[in-house]
Image (spheres, grey):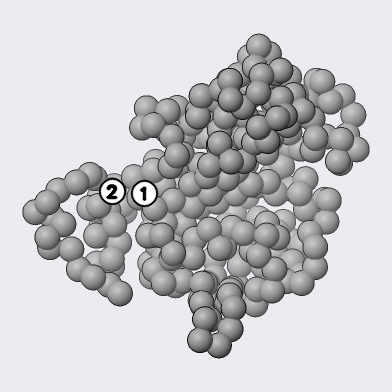
Amino acid sequence: MIDIQDLDVVFSSGADLVHAVRNVSCRIAAGESFGLVGESGSGKSTILRALCGLTPGWRGRMSIDGEELDPGARRSASFYRTVQMVFQDPYGSLHPRHTVNRTLSEPIAIHGLDNAGGRVEEALEQVGLGQGFRFRFPHQLSGGQRQRVAIARALILKPKILLLDEPTSALDVSVQAEVLNLLMRLREELSLTFVLVSHDLAVVSHLCDRIAVMRNGLVVEEVTSDELARGEPAQAYTRQLLLASKGYDRAAIDQFEDFG
């Protein structure tokens, strides 16, 4: 479903050059949930943004569902009916003056689809929000409810692929679990392919089959969720991330290695 080969992303030039992604390759099967994990600045979100067309000018090869992507071309409407993205911040990704109904109706109008009312109702039901939420504004919703609306907006075009950029990191821990369980259910019911970005190995291992660990724009290791659960990653950096995801431990932190 997703094929990435030798992806390179460079920002700026000269002394200010930032090599954000370096020679990354991966293949993700239809229906699979694939994780990208690493500390801030490791290049995880840049890969998602390159995939969905928000970061042009990348080098390498990428294809979605067998269709080759052009680094310099604007994505087509059919692309966005296949691929949708859910962003990190449920407060910033919804227009404050638009009701839930308008937010969910806009993609339907842009793509010229019919039965807008029925599609909105279906999307709200899929994410566990009743019709009572349909004409509310974002300020009338909790953080978890806003993220459910953002997920409903991504689902409204019935895509095959969801790109999830830290979809729970801005939420309370208890709400994180609810949203993760919702995503797991949607993946199974709708046969979706996920690419999930997170800095939290615990979150990624809960939702993903395979996980690529990134540092300084490079994939340093690829592991399965079972290998993580057994504490068997090969790289010291991955083991340190796994330890950090278990919570604050002063004795463990004092032994952390600086990988540069």
Kind of residue at badge 1? Asp
Q: Name the residue under label 1.
A: 200
For residue 228, which numbered disc appears in the image? none
Other-residue count near label 2 (Cα within 10 Å), few / some / many at <14 / 14–19 / ≥20? some
Query: Are the residues flagged by discs 2 and 1 in contact, CB closer than 8 Å?
Result: yes
- Residue 62 location (% of width, % of height): 67, 67
Q: Earlier in the sequence, mark 2 or mark 1?
A: 1
User: What residue do we see at 78% from left, 53% from top?
Assistant: 79
Alpha-carbon distance for marks 2 and 1?
Answer: 6 Å
Element assignment for label 2: loop
User: What residue do we see at 53% from left, 49% from top?
Assistant: 165
Q: Quadrant of the C terminus?
A: bottom left
For residue 245, which numbered disc appears in the image? 2
Left or right, 223 with reference to 18: left
Kind of residue at badge 2? Ser
The quadrant holding residue 156 is top right
Residue at the front extreme, as displayed: 97
The one nearer the camera, 225 or 243, is 243
The quadrant holding residue 91 is top right
Element assignment for label 1: loop
Question: 187 above or below 12?
Answer: above
Count of marks, rendered view: 2
- Residue 46 location (% of width, % of height): 56, 63
Residue 190 in sight in this render? no
The one nearer the camera, 186 or 39, is 39
